[in-house]
Structure formats: structure tokens, C-alpha cells
Image: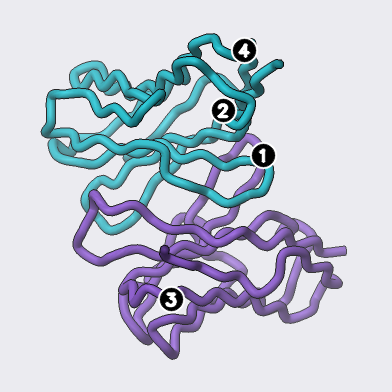
Chain colours: A cyan, B purple
Amino acid sequence: AQTVTQSQPEMSVQEAETVTLSCTYDTSENNYYLFWYKQPPSRQMILVIRQEAYKQQNATENRFSVNFQKAAKSFSLKISDSQLGDTAMYFCAFNFGNEKLTFGTGTRLTIIP
Amino acid sequence: DVKVTQSSRYLVKRTGEKVFLECVQDMDHENMFWYRQDPGLGLRLIYFSYDVKMKEKGDIPEGYSVSREKKERFSLILESASTNQTSMYLCASGRSALPHSPLHFGNGTRLTVT
């Protein structure tokens, strides 16, 4: 079975600090795709960043970057210089090549002014 | 920009009612999905469709059915609503055979069954 685990239900950091959200998964597949989605209070789920498992280089999108450790099956999201607008639920998600996304349970991140 | 529109933002229904949740996308996506979101459980897949009139069960299909008569529209049906179906429902669409392509989500429908 393919599982996705987010072990931090809630986190909070001061504005401008750096925060790392953790995600681990279990699969026997060799090639798959990894995503971090953000769901702000407005509820619109939007893509933050994505990574392809066969690529060794970690993906980066402005203040957002991932630390992908394939052997450890770990896919964490780092947010640098956090801003108030980063307050949201964050979900890691995986496409194991079967047209579906499997989601973690989410981390509620609060940025404190 | 891709737009995925869910017909209702909030819905209150009574136990035993038949409930329809509608979702429309405007980007000619082949795949459409219905997820249920509950605190502490994340998003769980109810059903998905990869073509008109095609559907496949997700992880929690019990108590639900779906309809996809047109490519742009995907409906979730609760045949006889129960209180344990009180939840947030999210519709999403995406390109077929492109697993690296992200899903696009609607704003969600918060359903309360009393």
C-alpha cells in the first residue's frame, strides 16, 4: 500500500523566519511525482511546488524549496522569509503513476506577525 | 487560467435527502476527481473519472455515486445523505497521462447533513 504521512498537525513561526514542513511516504514504485499544495483560509487549493522522483536536484520556487531524500522516502518543504500570506494548510501529495493523487493529512501553518 | 467551479459553497441537507454536488471545469481536462476533506484525515478520494461516462472508485466510495455525461461536468451524488457525510467536498481536474501535471481544484462545498 502507498501511504503518505505528515507528522506535524500544526506549526507556527514568526514572520520572516524559516520553517520546514515534513512529509514521508511509502511506496515500492521507482518513478513517481511529488507535490506540495497550499490551502489558505479561502479554501482554494493551489500548487506550491513539485518534484519528479527521478530528478536528483531539489525543486525551488522563489521562497519555497524541497528537500527530497529518495532513499529515506522523505519530502520536506522549506519556506524561507515566511510571510503572513503563507498562513494555510499545507498538504504533500504523490502521484504514483496511476492518474490519482494521494494526499497526506496536512499541516496547519500559522505565521505570527 | 484553469477554472474549476463548484456549484455551492455551503449546503445544508437533511438525513435521507438525495444530494447533488456539481463541478464544472473549463480547460478540457480528461480527468476529474471528487475528494472529501476532514480534519486530521486530509483529502480522501471518493471517485474519479478519466473520460465521459467512465468512472472509477477511489478509496471511500461507499454511500456515493457519480455522473459524467459531459467532459466538463462531474457530479457527485449522495443517494441518501447521512450525518457522517457532513464534510468538505473538493472537486479537481487534470490532464490525462501527465502525472507530473498538477490538479486544479474548485473552492470546495461544505456540506452539513442534519
Q: Name the residue under label 2.
A: A107
Residues behind callouts 3 and 2 on a single chain: no
Classify 10 Å Cα crowding around label 1: few (below 14), some (14-19), many (20 and above).
few
Q: Quadrant of residue B72?
A: bottom left
SS class, disc 3: loop
Vertical arrangement, residue A54 with respect to residue A111, above or below: below
Residues behind callouts 3 and 4 on a single chain: no
How far is the residue under mark 1 from the one under mark 4?
Answer: 21 Å
- Say which chain tag 1 marks: B
How far is the residue under mark 2 from the one under mark 1?
Answer: 10 Å
Q: Along the horizontal axis of the image, is B8 left or right of A49?
A: right
| Circle nearer the viewer, 4 or 2 | 4
Say which label, 4 or 2, has the lower sequence index: 4
SS class, disc 4: strand
Vertical arrangement, residue B31 with respect to residue A80, above or below: below
How far is the residue under mark 4 from the one under mark 2?
Answer: 13 Å
Residue at 35% over, 85% down: B52
Q: Name the residue under label 3.
A: B26
Q: Position of residue A3 (x, y in %)?
A: 38, 35
Residue at 43% over, 58% down: B104
- Say which chain tag 4 marks: A
Say which label, 3 or 1, has the lower sequence index: 3
Residue at 63% over, 35% down: B40
How many labels were placed on the picture? 4
